[in-house]
Amino acid sequence: MQKIAIIALGCPKNTVEAEYLLGVFKNKYLAISDNLNEADIAVIHTCSFIKIAREESEKYIRRVLDVKKKTGLRVYVSGCLPQLLKEKMLVLFPDIDGFVGTGTLKNLPELIFNKNFNSFLLPPGGLNNSNYRLLSSNIPSTYLKIAEGCGHKCSFCIIPTLRGRYESRAIKSLTDEAKALANNGIKELILVAQDTTNYGKDIYGVFALDKLLTKLAKINGLKWIRLLYAYPSSITDKLLEVFKEYKNICNYMDIPIQHISKNILSAMRRPLSTVAIIEKIKNKLPDIVLRTSIITGFPGETKKDVNELIAFLNQGYFQYVGVFEYSNQKEADSSKLNQQVKAVVAKERRILIENTQYEIFKAKIDKIKGTTLDLLVEKCLSKDSKYHIKGRGYFQSPEIDGSITSTTNSPLIAGKFYKATIKCVRGYNIEASFLD
């Protein structure tokens, strides 16, 4: 039996697609391998949203092609990089065996099994639904991709070009998948899309994320349901009411605002009402933990804009902030704007904002020291006659919000929830002690 290895790069949405592909290939009687040196086929599922993501994708392709020289591995590339480069893929990487874009992922098996599939037919889209899914992680958390594509026209973003128009999945399809995941031991379900709060508008005529969450919250076994990538202007009062109603919907929301200066938001083609929306959320849900993303060095950004942003952050609305330097992609409309900011200035501003936000984060954790909460254990390792525990609280999304760590005298079971008391913070990691 031939072995296939799939490397997923980029965001959680890519992870879900890679898991769909793993399920498809396993169903086609291929063995799944995580060792390139033992695999017969490799698929690199790429990202190219920003420059650094494209560079990472290209680096991995070269690394896998080096393995091909030694083992005869067949190498295929899928996702956003082929969608961006199209025919140039074979110019840059003549040794790959084939490629598919975002809208032709479902045709990857045809390409691999030599059924005359044309690599150059690359309409945008994504693998948004599948009857097969093989989870790639042993932790009891996973992502549910509720929609594909994007209907916004942010000037810095090429996602609509790479992924096409916004397409929601039906509520029944999503609840069926969520039930199957819960039956397989998943305790935490994290909703993702390019814009989660726009969910349902294209197929139901109204924003329907509140209805979807209500259905998901009633599924047995789901302890936590978490929301990422909420677009500010699509956050409705009905959605906030659902957060109040169901305890297993984490009191946590990720809302990428990108900036706060109206001058910059206008140039970005982002909602100008962002401040009012954040204030409304905190008024209705005062204890909610908010995360956001910010871009520094956007064309035309001034010291005044940065100071305005810092003043807003200092109001303490956000517990976590991801800060990214502006990536000038020639395919994006923002590349044509005047007053491009030097990379060194964008970096200085990123560091300034990160330092500002870290002090806010520490102050927030100081306020909850001594608080006892449910901790989801992800790892339990034995070392030096102690058990070293790594997990998360409801206010931490995997991989981006740090962890909660502890040592215990007795082992804890990964995938289960335990009561723990917050002790202190080191960096973005929090130390806790477990109750006897």
Image (cartoon, rainbow, N blue to C red):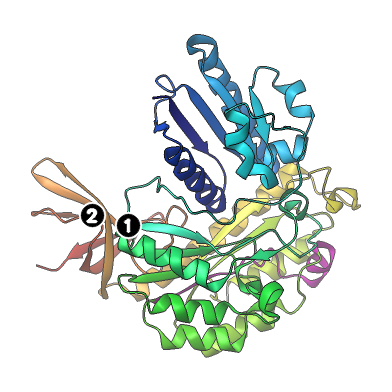
Q: Which residues are magenta?
A: 249-268
Indicate yes or no whether the magenta region holds residue 356. Answer: no
Relative vertical location of residue 409 with respect to residue 224 in this rendering, above or below: above
Q: Secondary structure at mark 2?
A: loop
Q: Which residue is mark 1?
A: 140
Residue 224, position as x, y percentages in the image: 37, 70
Q: Label 2 neighbourhood size at 10 Å, few (<14), some (14-19), many (20+)? A: some
Q: Earlier in the sequence, mark 1 or mark 2?
A: 1
Q: Nearer the viewer, residue 310 or 221?
A: 221
Q: Amino acid at mark 2?
A: Ala
Q: Nearer the viewer, residue 161 or 402?
A: 161
Q: Residue at x 44, y 61 (%)?
A: 397
Q: Quadrant of residue 366?
A: bottom left
Mark-to-mark CA distance, 1 and 2: 8 Å
Task: Please indicate whether residue 46 sits to the left or right of residue 306 in the image.
Answer: left
Residue 188, position as x, y percentages in the image: 37, 64
Q: Quadrant of the C terminus?
A: bottom left
Whether residue 286 is visible: no
Q: Quadrant of residue 308?
A: bottom right
Q: Quadrant of the N terminus?
A: top left
